[in-house]
Amino acid sequence: MVALQAPDVRVRRSSTSKRELYREDCQDEEGNRYTVIVWQNKPGLSTVSYTLDDGTPLHYEDKCYFALPSGRMLTRCDD
């Protein structure tokens, strides 16, 4: 009789996994609407990063503006 052994399957969780904190509605100078996602970079730390909902990275400029890699500026919507 042959004993069957379960394969050694281990789930490895990345310590660099991001967690979504919240989303914000923004728009560019032409009125095009975008969704900005604010990410917590590492659990337990206060560092955050920003992307569009399609994954495009954004640069936080100040409390009102984000910059796209193209240089186009996005502003937070008031509504």
Image: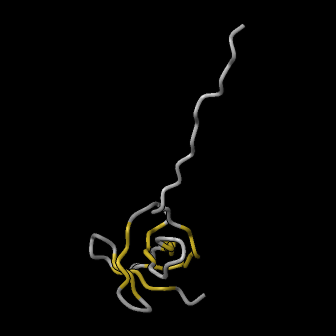
> How many numbered badges does the structure rendering display?
0
Q: Is residue 78 left or right of residue 67?
A: right
State how the image is colored.
Answer: secondary structure
Q: Quadrant of residue 3?
A: top right
- Residue, x 34% and y 78% (percent of image)? 67
Would you place residue 11 above or below residue 22 in this image?
above
Q: Residue at x 44, y 61 (%)?
A: 55
Q: Residue 13, percent across and down?
A: 53, 54
Q: Residue furthest front?
A: 1
Q: Specify the quadrant of the image occupied by residue 73.
A: bottom left
Q: Is residue 10 left or right of residue 59?
A: right
**Residue 10 drawn above or below residue 47:** above
Residue with the most extreme right position? 1
Q: Where is residue 54 drawn, in percent x and y?
A: 46, 60
> Whole-percent x and y of residue 77?
53, 86
Which corner quadrant holds the N terminus? top right
The quadrant of the picture occupied by the C terminus is: bottom right
Task: Please give the name of the residue rendered at 37% of the width and 73% of the height, measured from the top-left corner.
Answer: 58
Tell me what residue is drawn at x 27 percent, y 76 percent.
71
x, y percentage for residue 18? 50, 65
Q: In the image shown, does 56 or 8 lie closer to the viewer?
A: 8
30 lies left or right of 1: left
